[in-house]
Each structure stands twice: as C-alpha cells, then as structure tokens.
Amino acid sequence: MYIAITAQKLGQSYSNSAADYVAYLEKENEGLEPENQEYFFNQTEDRIAPCRVISEIDANTAKLKKTEPKFYSIVVSPSQRELQKIANNPEPLKTYTRELMKEYANSFYREKPITINQIKYFAKIEQERTCRGFEKEVLENAPSRKRIAKLENDIRKVARGELKGNIKKLEREITALRQAAPHQINGKMVVAGMKKEGNQSHIHILVSRKDVTNTFSLSPGSKYKASEVEMNGKKVQRGFHRDQFYEKAEQVFDKLFGYDRNFVETYTAKKALIKNPALFRMLLGNLPTNEKALALKLLSKSEMRIPSIPTNKVQLALKVFHRLRRGMQRAIESGSIGI
C-alpha cells in the first residue's frame, strides 16, 4: 500500500480551483457510456457529478491566502497482491476509502477530536496507470529511444534529399531496436505514458483544506505531529499524525479483507528501509523461513526490480539495499508515492 499526500500546485503557486484536477481525473471516462463510467463519491453518496465536486471544493476556501493550498490530493495505491485479495473490485475499494477517511480525521491533533463528519472530500477510483519517466524500465529503454529518434530524423532527411541513405534499411534498424529494448509491454518498447500491465486500480481523494463548515483549517501537510501554538492569546493544538495515518491505513485494509500482510509490505519496514537500512536487513533476516521467502519474492517483484537477491543467506548484499533505497526515494521525491 502506497499513499501520497500532496498539496495541489499550479506552477509555483497553489491552484485557485479544483477544476483542472477534476478534469484530469475524468480522463478515463472519455468516450464511455454513462453506465460504464466511474463517478466521484464521498462518505455517504455515490455518483457525484464532477461539476459538484468543483463547486463545493472551490467554495470551501474562506480566509485562505494565495500562498496556502485550497485542497489536498491523497492517492492510495494498493499493491498487486492487495488488489488480488479483493479481486480488483471497485466496491471494496470504496468501502476501504470510507473507513480510511475516518482514520484521516482521527489523525488530526486538536482539542476536540476531528470526526469524518467534519471532512469535506470527494474520491474517485481509476483503473489504469501509465509508465513515468523516472521509472527504471523507462530509464533503461532511454538509449534505444534516443537512437530510434535519431534514425527517424535521418529518415526524414533522406526523404527530403538532405542525407544519403536507404530508408528501408533505417526502418529495419528501428524495428530491431524496438524489439531488442530491455523492457517490453505486449511486445512494445516501454516508454513514458504507456499503460501498465496487470491490475492498476488506485484511489484519488480530493480533500478540502477547510472543514465542512468552512471555518477552520485542517492541513495534513503540517510538519507538526502534535504541538501547541499561541493564537490571539490562547493556546491552540495543531498537527497531523502521518505515521499513525499510514499505519492505520494498513490495519483498516487488513481487518476489512482478512489480508495477511508480509513484513516488507508494512509501513514500519518501508520506513526502516529508507532511514535505517541496517535495521531493515536485520529485521528481514530474523523473519521465520516462510515469511522471509515470501518477503524476498515480493521484493524481487517490486517496481525497483532488485537483481539476484540471494535467498539462501541471512545477510543480503548491502549494495542491493542501497539500490532499493535510492529507487524508493526517487519515487517519493517524484510525488508518485509516499510512505
């Protein structure tokens, strides 16, 4: 389970409207009949129109400055294994989203506990994902793409008479390069923007910065887990427990669907991998044999594509974990995941 929480920006400033983001989330509905479309939903309603999402989020921004985000995006990406557990069914994902947002509300640090009834949000399930430029498969195909681009340019020059050459020969070379590219999807070279294989269902949640009454701010981007500040001579509690939220996100899924989470799928493990690789290796090495075997299998099938992990040793190669750690950090910095 990967969760990213980001404030929506338009260039260097925060967007004044949710319209662009909602339009982006409607891309999978293009060309589909109404009965086949995915609709927005919230805690109590289904089939919410995009125009309502925009109007309600945009109207819920009282007293927010231009330098403050008006809404946040939460992207929840279950793993292939988690999606298999629920048969990639959107209905369980809706149920999960509604339980998850209760934990989102509970994760705010305030004098009076925040409840889900105070959170204004709209969510939408998407079925597809595309390859991104930072991903390993796209990067490793880059030399082939660069060579193909040059050959295609040469073909245009030959056609215009600016360069001597055999167009058929150049076209065969391009075909050979595409077929020899290290990463393919359905026989085609992996490039940025290409649809990924397998179950790719994930949840986009658009949540207002302000509460439903449009009177006070609820920022999941707060750097403070739990703190008190003085405002108008009065001490005020603030903060958002991100660690608590991420841990509860796993626990809710596991409880709802009876999911048996392996060590490497936990927030604790991912956090240790980034902040303390030595601790991660130790915890992995101490797992029971069966759990360790599954952990290594899951790691080897992860998006980082770790090469040749020795399953017969307790101490795994240090360079492998540095590579995994760097890969995960790049993904986080790109905004694709958060843990």
Image: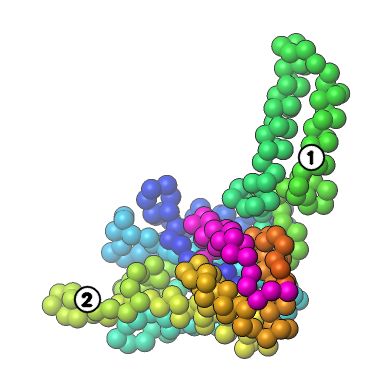
The amino acid sitting under disc 1 is: Arg
Q: Residue at x 64, y 83 (%)?
A: 287
Q: Earlier in the sequence, mark 1 or mark 2?
A: 1
Which residue is denoted by mark 2 in the rendering?
229
Which residue is denoted by mark 1 in the rendering?
178
The amino acid sitting under disc 2 is: Val
Quarter of the picture containing the N terminus is bottom right
Bounds of the magenta span? 312-339
The stretch drawn in magenta includes residue 122: no
Residue 108 spot, x, y in % from top left: 38, 79
Q: Which residue is drawn at 68% across and 86% down?
A: 288
Q: Residue at x 75, y 11 (%)?
A: 161
Residue furthest left in the image: 233
Residue 153 spot, x, y in % from top left: 70, 24
Tell me the CA gap for discs 1 and 2. 59 Å
Res. 47 image quadrant: bottom right
Above or below, comparing residue 111 to residue 7 in the picture: below
